[in-house]
Image (tube, rainbow, N blue to C red):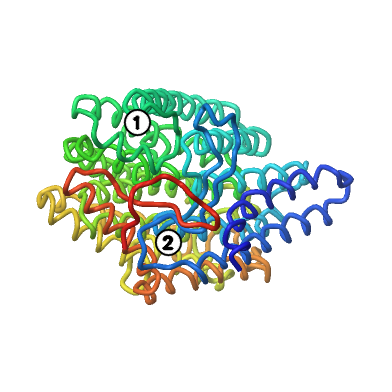
Amino acid sequence: MEFINQWILTVLIALPLVGGLALFLLPRENVGLARLVALGVSIVEFVLSLHLIAHFVPSYAVFQFGQVLDWLPKSTGVQYVVGVDGLSLILVILTTALCPLVILSSWSSIEKNVREFLALFLLLETAMVGALVAIDLVLFYVFWEAMLIPMYFIIGFWGGKDRIYATTKFFLYTVVGSLLMLVAFSYLYYVHAQTTGTYTTNLIELYRTAALLPLSTQMWMFAATALAFAIKVPLFPFHTWLPDAHVQAPTPGSVILAGVLLKMGTYGLMRFSIPLFPSAATQAAPVMITLGVIGIIYGALIAWRQTDIKKLVAYSSVSHLGFVVAGMFALNEQGFTGALYQMVNHGISTGALFLLIGVVYERRHTREMRDYGGLAKVMPWYAFFFVVATMGSVALPGTGGFIGEWLILLGTFRAYPWLGVLCGTGVVLGAVYMLWLVLKVVWGPLENEENKVLTDVTKRESFILGTLSVLIFVFGFASAPILAHTQATLVNLTKSVSLQAPYETSLVGVGLNLKSTVGVK
């Protein structure tokens, strides 16, 4: 068991990579086999990731399943260091759970160059998992940049008619932010060497070095890293790439973009920007919450005005992720917990909505609301899944979204009451535009002749949407055992920020003798 615990994260990183490369060995015309191989690899990946839940110790705020291997020359201080804590664990499981469903959804939506699409998707899964478990700054940066490459080609080759514009915009926004983050990481590497006489890019070591920097230096470092992650979220006013990317991406691309990739930005803020520079985060909190609130209201109002279904859901992501940013920059336990929980809930409910849009788009080849209406009469199961996904999106009590948004509002009210009030308006506006969408697409008269002959969801589509529907309510009714895995880590993070002191943690693994701060129970 110790051997498995030590190697499980490396296996989770390597398995999709090996599977993706293996797909290129298959004949291009053997589409069926390529699909089965990709689906099989993603299912095995998910099953293996359940080992993390089974053996994770929730009461310890440390990185578990740790592994340290030599990578670059020792003199550089750069190593292969991986581990998971309460912050990354839940996001790793979200990633491995969504990927098989997304691959299964590509059965009908991806018809050309299927082998290449599936190979790129598995490579994307490797990069996403790697970024979530990396505890070395250089290793994280490699995975962070690696995510960009498969997504660039997924949108650029399998996207809509304006895919080149959308993917170029996506690429430029992300690269600019990444370069700023690289500059901040490089400076921190240099400062640590000047302070201690040793070179390292190990995040555990750098938490202490960064937190002890003067406030003015912290502010510049925080600005550089937070800007990179804010672009990825995307936080207002850096959101303009997202609607274009969502609208032009194929359905599987939109689902994984909303489900996981956007969470890399919010994860980065909670993993790097806030704990590395706690004093700067405290000073910047009012500005960050204000931007989050603007994003909530602006995204909701713009979503309400959309006639393209996919663009409406895309702008809803700007609003929902504004909630996440507002919650985390309340800088208290309730805000952190709500932000993390809402990352997962948004991935599930919005992923389901993009899949539902893909179902009718494959049948009608239009995303305009005026072309639909009355679908419940001919597609009753489709209407059922649409309503469930909407319930999750508008945070109806009983869904995971309700728990996440309630915790965020509680944390924000405690820190900044008036901004909390403004956050609350987003809940109302979210219900307005989503119920408007349901009314226009699902209910009303069935007037369009083309809609009268539409077939309901297939067994494959029902399985995918049914799984996500169940998860929406599981996260609503079983929040306590789920959040128990995150509590120790988030309490530790709250303590670090409130004291404006170094974030203290350690790496737990087999045969490790890693110089680090003391583990916190």
Q: Amino acid at mark 2?
A: Val
Specify whether 191 is left or right of 49.
Answer: left
Q: Amino acid at mark 1?
A: Leu
Mark seen at residue 308? none
Q: Quadrant of the N terminus?
A: bottom right
On the question of residue 387 being in view, the answer is: no
| Residue pictured at 74% horizontal, 48% vertical | 18
Residue 458, x across and y down, in percent: 67, 68
Q: Residue furthest bottom?
A: 477
How far apart are labels 1 and 2 at the CA level?
35 Å
How many numbered marks have been drawn onto this rendered protein structure? 2
Mark seen at residue 438? 2
Residue 213, x across and y down, in percent: 24, 30
List the residue tagged with mark 1.
227
Residue in front for this viewpoint, 284 or 82: 82
On the question of residue 15 being in view, the answer is: yes
Image quarter of residue 279: top left
Specify whether 423 is left or right of 302.
Answer: left
Q: Label 1: few (<14), some or many (≥20) within 10 Å?
A: many
